[in-house]
Amino acid sequence: MLTYLRRSAAQVVFVLLGIALINFFLLHLAPGDAAQVLAGESGAATPEYMEALRRQFGLDQPLYVQFLRYLGNLVTFDLGYSFRQSLPVSELILQRLPATLLLMGTAIGFALVAGCSLGFLAARRAGKLTDTVISIVALLFYATPVFWVGIMLIVVFSVMLDWLPVGGMTSVEANLSGLALVGDVALHLVLPAVTLGLFYLAIYARLMRAAMLEVYGQDFVRTARAKGVRPRRIAWRHVLRNALLPIVTTLGVQLGSILGGAVLVETVFSWPGLGRLAFAALFQRDLNLLLGILFCSSVVVVLVNIAVDLVYTLLDPRIELN
Amino acid sequence: MMGRDWRVAGGVRRRLVVAAATMMTAAVVVGVIPGPMASAAAQEARQGGTLSIILQPEPVTLTPSTNMAQPTQVVAGNIFDGLVTYDFELKPKPALAERWEVAPDGLTITFHLRSGVKWHDGQPFSAADVKWSLENVWKTIHPRNKSLFENVTQVDTPDEATVILRLSKPSLPILSVLNGVGAPILPKHLYEGTDVLNNPYNNKPVGTGPFVFKEWKRGEYVELTRNPDYWEAGKPHLDRLLFRMIPDAAARAAAIEKGEIQYAPYNPVPFRDAERLAKLPRLKVDTRGYEWLSPLLYLDFNVENQYLKDVRVRRAIAHAIDRAALAKIVWFGYAKPAISPVPSSLVTFHNAKLPQYPFDVKKAEALLDEAGLKRDANGVRFTLTHDFLPYGDDYRRTGEFLKQALKRVGIEVTIRSQDSAAFIKRVYVDRDFDSAISYNNAFPDPQIGVVRAFWSGWLGTGTPWTNGSGYRNPKADALIQAAGVEGDPAKRVAQFNEFQDIVLGDVPSLPLLELNFFSVYSADLQGIVEQGDQVYSSLKNARFVDAPKGN
């Protein structure tokens, strides 16, 4: 275990350096720079003004100098400075992180519980009406574009029924605090979390059903049946546990995407998350900020991968870390 | 908007409840307001309340000294007062300057400032602030004003309330940019000796305007509160402005329709939604308040292109485009055909008697034939690539409209899309394009927003929104430069008339449409659109009234 972690740590450093390198040069391939975007947004510019901006952003330096500076920052755990937003990148990320964690956590939690339950149900009633209905619903949620689901939910639940707010994270105009604020955020969370959750739910339901059916076909289940173990016990003790492995893998992948957030859902619901921040940073050529978000996301992906390996060994003692 | 408890009440009734609640929380309730609002005074106007406004996209900074992007200015117009504001005819009206005089030779401009004005941090506002801002911001780092103020050689402040600009040559357009965002006056005591570009106050601005900056929660909102010490007694009426960022257009429409947002400037929703919202009695759609900007949609031809370098081809394309249909079909009537690069809202300078390019397919074909560009076996004369300004579907659809129009005369068009950084680099830096659709704001004087598209002086510098076509004409250049330093207003008009005649004849850039931006606001609001630079000015006159007016 310890050897595994030590070796992983060494690999992580190399992986992250590689990611930083690729990110940096890939992003610099995009035509146009931040000074041009700013000047473009202003609707006017003088050559001197553009020059002043480039000097301020460090864009007048050769690319390799910019890269070395960036690496130097990373080694000292400094994500750099967003000149466009006039704030350190780490501060910008930390400002948005809670909103993203809340949204993704709720959505994935909801999707995991509901999706796995539906998948479990469908597998136990395989071929029956319940299974068909669940499969069709899952397929629908999976195939419908997320932004469309979001807008439809807004139209129905916000505009027509007037039950829930259209977007945002709090009712700023109401100046709430304490419990009232928590309730208010929860209200604002419902639609985006459900929208995002429905998509993941479909994935978990399909995956769970398929995994369980596969396990049902294996010898040890037949043996258990032959021994007269009750179907409910077979489902819970023998099948479910084994079927969880692919779920954990998928969960790992999705947890890795947490920092990137869900751009579409955050956009539709004006949710102040990291996905929107990254999206805007790309269009504004705010490369320091974008690199920061990508880098943090990479770190999360790598760490979650290690965690998934560890969870495997807990779920299935036959798997060894080597 | 009050707490969530009101949500059970829907529609009009809900707005009444909100208005009543607003009244209860208001500190003062005013009755009849004298002046231009007298006709509406039968409805009871309220002092106080929170106005929720759409701000899109999120601004980069809140101080308009170095960044002239639209969202920055929409917020900053409420925080920073200018020396003047502009009425619907684009004439300057007093603001921080109570009056001003231009010397007969045009070489001295004197401003008499209002006394007793305070910055939001309590420090007195004085002529020194104006002098410092002119010398350290407008003349140096301001993206647009640098060239306008370059003839100002000296700024004298004989007393705290007088600013005298001394110029080496007359520079009349100066009087057209002196509002809060056009020539922002920054507090000298907070900026002097600092790096203006990186000053922390850029993101927590201190101005003299009717609203005071309170908080900017990135990704969510910018909050301003009422300035209790504002120099204009009794104003502003509202307690709070909340600028909310809602990135998705459909969500914006929903928020407006639901009443969560009561004011949404700058084409907040697609035209189709605007049509629908305009029919709701609770809402109004208004195209006034953008006169100071006077946006013009145009088609730049790359005059170095092997086909487009022939003026006959450019004229043929001009004849091939039905601009009235473009305005109606693509822009849903929120535009009108442009007949000159100087939009008609610039009443003084617009020349309505220029020779035109009426929609005439036969004439277009004849011109192309004359240029020696015959149709091939497939009916195609030649192929062009078209880059459109990536600011939304309206520009892409304009490109598609042009593609159809040009196909009729045998020109095959490929439409290319990209993001704005790539667009700017392609058109203004690399000049790797055939034709491009874009828009410029003209502003009240052609010197500010129009001539940059034709002057050859900035060619080769890669400066966005300056002469994308690559046009060089010594006569046009000479007129531009002469008008810039002409002190006689009548002579300037004559110079610009000739200038319009030349560039419309050469047509390196074809004026397509004068765009009408629109705002959507709640019908129970008054005083939302009061002047020609409203969208970049303050909402000090805005207030809620008792009941929505039917419309």
Image: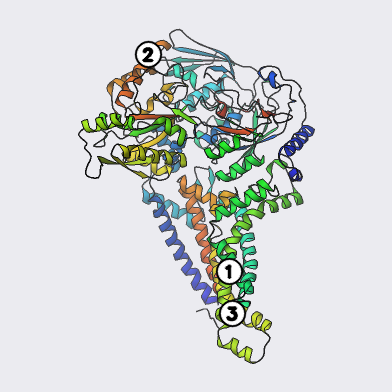
- The lab-note entry on whether marks 1 and 2 share a chain reads no
Magenta stretch, overall SS: loop
Q: Nearer the viewer, residue A5 or B483?
A: B483
Using a 10 Å C-alpha cutoff, classify the residue at mark 3 as few (fewer than 14 neighbours), some (14 to 19) or many (20 or more).
some
Q: Which mark is residue B145?
A: none
Q: Relative to residue A146, is residue A312 depicted above or below?
A: below
Q: Which residue is mark 1?
A: A135
The answer to whether residue A319 is magenta is yes
In this rendering, the label closer to the viewer, 1 or 2: 1
Name the residue nearer the viewer: A140 or B80. A140
Residue A284 position (above or below residue B320): below
Report how far apart the C-alphas of labels 1 and 2 lie in the structure. Answer: 75 Å
What percent of the width, then of the height, locates residue B309? 25, 32
Instruction: Look at the image and say whether residue B55 sits in the magenta stretch.
Output: no
Q: Earlier in the sequence, mark 3 or mark 1?
A: 1
Residue type highlighted by circle 3: Asn
Same chain for labels 3 and 1? Say yes or no. Answer: yes
